[in-house]
């Protein structure tokens, strides 16, 4: 009787210890451990994540710098053109060193040519500046599309591993297929997260570029007004 009770106590204690061990193991499963369950497919997904963050920071800083403009920029250009100081107006553009300043500077270099030639010079320069702002954005969009594909590839690899383990052990218990399930779920989630993040960053940068392009268009129109109005006044006086 005493031996039976002792065995029950020992068995109960062992079960409790085992339960506590499982609980501790479950609690100690960190995010890094969870990501490691994804297997080798997590490496390209991680590379894509760091590439997306790097491209976003680099493009953000460039576009942010390109959007800066002296509030008195056009006023300075207007004052120098009023004094027929084209060289002084060009120096203002050179000092500013922004896409808008380079665009207006190219237009100033065509003064004396027909208005259409001035407009063409400004438009061509604007296209070059917009291309510089959009540089590498295509790669960011590609990451947004490729990252989920790597996640789905991890899903396929995980399922293959799970079925392989089942065929080897001839057992469909959760312990046999758990590693395959981990791989399938972790890689899919990671790929989707990186893809969504890259898409959001791409959209944000595109919105920044659109605002900058709108500013360039408004500035170009105002600059053409500065050039065109004096011509209109002179023609009216001659008549």
Image: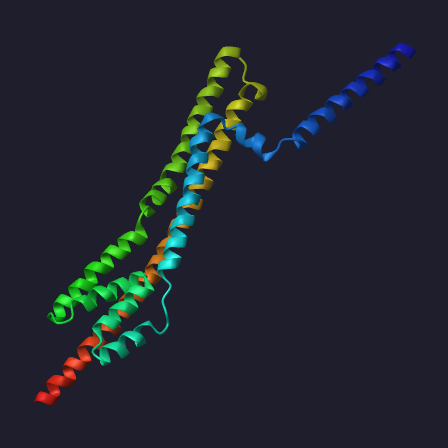
**Count of numbered circles in the view:** 0
Q: Is residue 170 above or below residue 143?
A: above
Q: In what quadrant of the picture does the C terminus appear?
A: bottom left
Evaluate whether residue 62 shows in this view: yes
Q: Is residue 111 above or below residue 22?
A: below
Determine the residue located farthest toward the right in the rendered image.
2
Q: Nearer the viewer, residue 217 or 98?
A: 98
At 34% across and 41% down in the image, what residue appears?
Answer: 142
Quadrant location of residue 226?
bottom left
At 44% across and 21% down in the image, what residue appears?
Answer: 160
Question: How far from the left and from the top, in percent, is residue 16?
Answer: 77, 23
Question: How far from the left and from the top, in percent, is residue 76?
Answer: 31, 75
Question: How far from the left and from the top, in percent, is residue 87?
Answer: 22, 71
Q: Nearer the viewer, residue 210 or 27?
A: 210
Give the color scheme: rainbow, by chain, secondary structure or one colour: rainbow
At 23% across and 80% down in the image, what residue appears?
Answer: 83
Evaluate whether residue 221 shows in this view: no
Q: Is residue 196 above or below residue 22?
A: below
Q: In what quadrant of the picture does the N terminus appear?
A: top right
Q: Nearer the viewer, residue 132 or 43?
A: 132
Q: Is residue 206 above or below residue 122?
A: above
- In the picture provided, is 76 more to the left or to the right than 185? left
At 46% across and 26% down in the image, what residue appears?
Answer: 40
- In the picture provided, is 207 more to the left or to the right than 218? right
Q: Nearer the viewer, residue 195 or 234?
A: 234
Quadrant location of residue 71?
bottom left
Question: How far from the left and from the top, in percent, is residue 63?
Answer: 37, 56
């Amino acid at each position: 009787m005493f031996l039976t009770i002792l065995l029950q106590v020992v068995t109960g204690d062992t079960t409790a210890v085992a339960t506590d061990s499982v609980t501790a193991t479950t609690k100690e499963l960190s995010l890094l451990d969870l990501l490691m369950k994804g297997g080798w497919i997590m490496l390209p997904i991680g590379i894509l994540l760091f590439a997306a963050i790097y491209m976003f920071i680099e493009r953000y800083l460039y576009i942010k710098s390109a959007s800066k403009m002296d509030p008195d920029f056009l006023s300075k250009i207007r004052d120098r053109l009023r004094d027929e100081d084209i060289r002084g107006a060009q120096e203002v553009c050179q000092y500013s060193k922004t896409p808008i300043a380079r665009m207006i500077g190219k237009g100033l270099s065509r003064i004396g040519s027909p208005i259409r030639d001035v407009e063409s010079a400004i438009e061509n320069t604007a296209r070059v500046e917009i291309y510089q702002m959009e540089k590498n954005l295509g790669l960011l969009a590609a990451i947004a599309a490729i990252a989920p594909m790597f996640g789905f590839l991890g899903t396929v690899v995980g399922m293959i591993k799970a079925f392989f383990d089942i065929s080897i052990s001839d057992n469909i218990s959760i312990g046999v297929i758990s590693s395959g399930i981990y791989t399938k779920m972790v890689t899919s989630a990671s790929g989707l997260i990186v893809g969504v993040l890259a898409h959001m960053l791409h959209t944000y940068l595109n919105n920044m570029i659109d605002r900058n392009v709108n500013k360039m268009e408004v500035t170009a129109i105002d600059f053409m007004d500065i050039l065109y109005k004096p011509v209109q006044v002179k023609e009216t006086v001659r008549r």
